Image (tube, grey):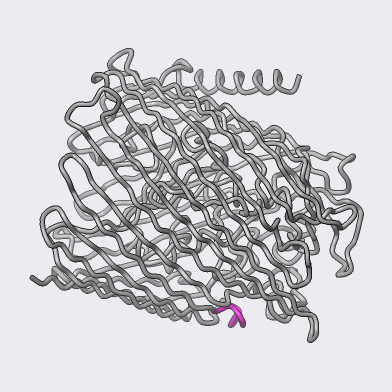
Amino acid sequence: MNTILRTLKVKLFTLILTSYLGISSSSYANVLLEDDVEVIEITGSKTFDTISTLPYTAYVLDRQSIEKANFRNIIDNFKLVPGVLVQKTSHGQGSPFIRGFTGYRNLMLIDGIRLNNSTFRSGPNQYWSTIDISSVQQVEIIKGPQGVEYGSDGIGAIVNTSTITPTFNKNSLTFMTRLAEGENSNIFGSRFNFSSSADNALTMGVTKKDFGDFQMASGTLQNSGYDELAYDIKWQKQLANSTVTFAHYVVKQDDVPRTHKTIFGHSFAGTTIGSELQRDHDQTRNLTYAKFSHQPLSNPFYTDLDLTLSYHQQDEERTRLRTGDRFDRQETNVATTGLSATLSKHVNNALRFNYGLDVYHDDIESYASNNPIQGPVAGDADYLNSGLFAKVVGNPMEQLTLALGARYTYISAESDRIQSPITSDVISLDRTWNNVAFALEGIYALSHNASAYLTVAEGFRAPNFSDLSRFDSARSSEFEVPSTELEPEQYLSTELGLRLAYQSWKLNTGLYYTDIEDQIVRFPTGNVNVDGEFEISKANATSGEVYGWEFDFLAQLNEQWSFRIFGSLNYGETFQFPESLSEPKKEYIGRLMPHNVGGIVNCESSDKRWYAQAEILAQQRADRLSTRDIRDTGRIPPEGTPGHVIVSLRAGYTVSDTLNLAASIENVTDKDYRIHGSGQNEVGRNISVALNWDVEFD
């Protein structure tokens, strides 16, 4: 019955949306190409090539826009994307909420390789902060479930980070520095590019970051600073109709404090301060991969082939001092071996097939000084995530493109070292799950300058070891215990959008609705541990929906002046179990994003030598709270998180062909504010200056 109601609900919503735009539910737009319309390439999608061909909402942050924004890390750039809430548990941790989902329900890729592994948590986590902004060439945020192309996870969005690629026929050394007063941060880096021939090139980079205790509008947040070191190398060799790539990336973060859990926390609008003396996190992430790309002159099976072999090592350690003699340490090490192959075959101009496979295997070790059986997750554990997908894209008429895709996913989880939540004895785990997901997508060219798109896509998320075996603290005053009998979560999403592009202005707007079934939800067991924390467990016990509206409007007034207005409305409710599993209550989803709007006015010289822009970001009071939000007194004020309006100014100047300067004043009015769900306030007035000096040599 639930499945029938779910299907009827989505069909009804689809009918309403399609009636609103006056197109059929099977329509899907072809390319919207004009000489005066910017064409932005997409690599995160395995099927479509440019933003204008996508049947769903996507945003691209290229290197130029990243440098203009002048943020200290990659996560802060998400502030300028509609429908994204950038939550920060601490200064060194950032976890975006995208269309109501965060943590392991968003999938991060690095050059198409999964960053997510089977130990990621459901709530906000720190892993995306290990992507060094100095190594990033482009970030693609693809909204909505992509279960056909990427399998488990990625319900809110798929985010693909493309790293800097070496330049052929160029030898250069680039120096970069960024100094910020309010953040109390110093960043220094350099990048070397060497090309021995027109088909052989290498790039290497290193960045050292020193983040001190930063300044809020109300004063210094003590115990908020940390250090970070990152370095990378990428080599490319072009062969006949082929490219070989080898890359290696390392990021190390030392002593990143979770300040709000400690006595150094800051009370804001009635939030409580932590009691611990220390809670620091170390992270080290190493990614090594080799990729082979081939475009044969003639092949019966494929027109394009991408084959990638990867090894991803992610290590994290937490040290915790609760009182003078109560110290504990825990550590988790995950080694992921990955293999993926993506192929496409162009039969003719109107028909294309995309297909492929991917396999990721996690080898997990976990340790805790206060638990002889396991660490925060199961030890001696293996997790296999594999799948096959296929998609056919066709043009039944000139204005219409349709795509139909399917994916089979097989996932297994094994461990010999889990602590039973009932007997406290050692238990083992051996589980497997199968899933088949479908997607129907369409984009229709209403005119040469306008297109409408509609997507109905299934998404799912299999339980990972954080769900199945976590034995660790969760939100404020909560302690989570293992739940080994969980099943996959199921999602069905409908999105309808309109894309307009003319010579002087562009508009992207869309409605989305995601139906939720069998979502894994936490509930109190009724037990309290020795530290006074409420014991919680998990079950596939909730259903509900998330829906909303997003828009982004850009107008070029003349050669120099332009402005952009963007915003979103986000709604969501699911059944929660604030008291016990037998007492369901329909509530707002946790940390529901408040309604928001942003605006940017930009002025640029006709010769592109300088630019200046003013930015305004505004959010309403976040008072649509769940019971768990209300209980999270360390992060969320009793009456909800106050709204705010933040003004920032940015400017840049090209001194010469080799020297560029950028400067910004963020939070000009020195507003004391907090992003909803965060464990700290944001930086007060922050003046930053960045310099890039590129020297070429023979």
Q: Position of residue 335 (x, y in %)?
A: 53, 57
Of residue 327 and residue 433, the one placed in the foreground of this image is 433
Please say whether residue 65 is visible from this viewpoint. no
The residue lying furthest to the bottom in this view is 324
Give the number of callouts: 0
Q: Quadrant of residue 311?
A: bottom left
From the viewer's perspective, tell me whether residue 345 is left or right of residue 371.
left
Magenta stretch?
A: 217-225
Q: Is residue 252 above or below residue 587?
A: below
Task: Give the answer, above or below, for where 300 lies relative to 87.
Answer: above
Residue 158 in picture, x, y percent from top left: 48, 44
Give the image quarter of residue 694. Answer: bottom left
Residue sitting at the far left: 698
Q: Is residue 544 magenta?
A: no
- Taking depth in this image into account, of 276 and 370 the one nearest to the observer is 370
Question: Residue drawn at (41%, 32%), measured in percent from left and top?
Answer: 356
- The spot of residue 32 in percent (x, y) is 28, 30
Residue 429 visible, this orientation:
yes
Q: Is residue 138 above or below residue 614?
A: above
Q: Is 220 part of what is drawn in magenta?
A: yes
The residue depicted at 50 percent of the width and 22 percent of the height is 20
